[in-house]
Amino acid sequence: MFNKVLIANRGEIALRIHRACRELGIATVAVHSTADADAMHVRMADESVCIGPPSATQSYLNMPALISACEITGAEAIHPGYGFLSENATFVQVVEDHGLAFIGPTAEHIRVMGDKIAAKDTMKALGVPCVPGSDGAVTTAEEAMDVAADIGFPVLVKASAGGGGRGMKVARTAAELPNAFASARSEARAAFGDDAVYLEKYLGAPRHIEIQVFGDGKGRAVHLGERDCSLQRRHQKVFEECPSPVLLEADRARIGATCAEAIAAMNYRGAGTIEFLWENGEFYFIEMNTRLQVEHPVTEAVWRVDLVKEQIRVAAGLPMSFDQATLRPEGHAIECRLNAERLPDFAPCPGEITAYHAPGGLGVRMDSAIYRGYRIPPYYDSLIGKLIVHAEDRPTAIARLRRALSEMIVDGIDTTLPLFDALTRDPDVEAGNYDIHWLEKWLAGAA
Ligand code: ADP
């Protein structure tokens, strides 16, 4: 096992990783920008290193500074968290070239899954169901028209290098296709320096259901069920639950086994998420995330595992501490993402927290790095905390969430807290009756 781990992140996830290290008896090194000198992850860590000015490009994305921080402190491994350098294959290569361990998958797996065309080809070959579409890249508008005629409108033009919903255009009719094709390409070229695009059938009202997988890098792998993350605003997840209110045990077992087999065949190492759209009882692969997800705690609650400790174990070459037969899900978990944003327009709202009280009690977990007197810097993501509840069943989890929300106090800044109380009282949410467009429609109606 490692003696010392460097945490290449900030905020709640840096604290989350620190906690796992502490319990494993591993010393931690926090890194921070000058804007984060007072951050909780810096206070909690055994050591800290300032790696640059506020801009993420010069600090949390600064590879030479991170490697130097390891060399100065003697850290043997780097946990990247999510975002920043977590899915950067070059970074993994640099880390390993310096004789350090990367707590995550190999550079090659990150590279393949970061290229959506290659990812889809790989998954298709491994028997994972995909959205009908073009066979690889589409290079001309004429070719796009042929593919669309084949799969039927509406279609979606997607950037192979895409992320964050960029480089993605819908064409509802043949007349819209040339434009959608050209603008997806130019957006992709501008955003990612790569204009490769492909075509997919556009699904009208799917749910977002993702499968948590975990591999030891040596051909053993398991699945840890699904998370339903259909409640989204602008492709950003807002409210996530495990299990999905719509999946039957047999569906879970079938798609879970398919994913675990694919991951085992790839010799995938560590935590990963295979994302699907789900419509009319069918799963359609859209992408794989080769990192820990923001919403991982709902899986941890129901499947009773510590995904971060497990990531560290396999990165250190130890065997996984669970197998499919010993994993037994129990109950229902829900996560709400608390953002420092002003409703109704979700405008970022940095500033000083003048009062903070976190909810507690049975089945309540609060992952956050805020404290009274903390000043949220304006430079980074607006996520300031995650409230996770777990209970024996979904109605009890919703009641517990409502209760926990009523205990929470965050003063001094605006947050998305009021949104969640309203959501837990909505009949559609109570019934689990929503698709990926539901929240935006609901927000438009509520505004
Ligand atoms: P990104 O990496 O840019 O987030 P994804 O492939 O994960 O791209 O897709 C982002 C979102 O776009 C999905 O969560 C879904 O809302 C929508 N989407 C993607 N593919 C399709 C599709 N074939 N049909 C309908 N919606 C889609």
Image (cartoon, rainbow, N blue to C red):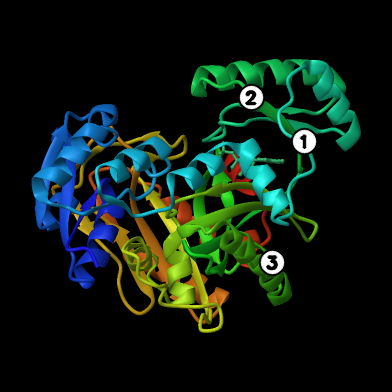
For this view, does 311 lie left or right of residue 57?
A: right
Residue 243 drawn above or below residue 71: below
Residue receiving disc 3:
246
CA distance separating discs 3 and 1 = 31 Å
For this view, does 92 lie left or right of residue 436?
A: left
Under mark 3, the amino acid is Val
Q: What residue is shown at x 69% (from left), y 66% (from top)?
A: 246
Q: Nearer the viewer, residue 278 or 186?
A: 186
Q: Can you say which quadrant of the picture contains the N terminus? A: bottom left
Of pointers 1 and 2, the one earlier in the residue sequence = 1
Under mark 1, the amino acid is Asp
Q: What residue is shown at x 56% (from left), y 32% (from top)?
A: 162
Q: Which mark is residue 19?
A: none
Q: What residue is shown at x 60% (from left), y 15% (from top)?
A: 186
CA distance separating discs 3 and 2 = 35 Å
Residue 220 drawn above or below residue 443: below
For this view, does 190 lie left or right of residue 63?
A: right
- Residue 411: x %, y % from top left: 24, 49
Q: Which mark is residue 135?
A: 1
Of pointers 3 and 2, the one earlier in the residue sequence = 2
Residue receiving disc 2:
196
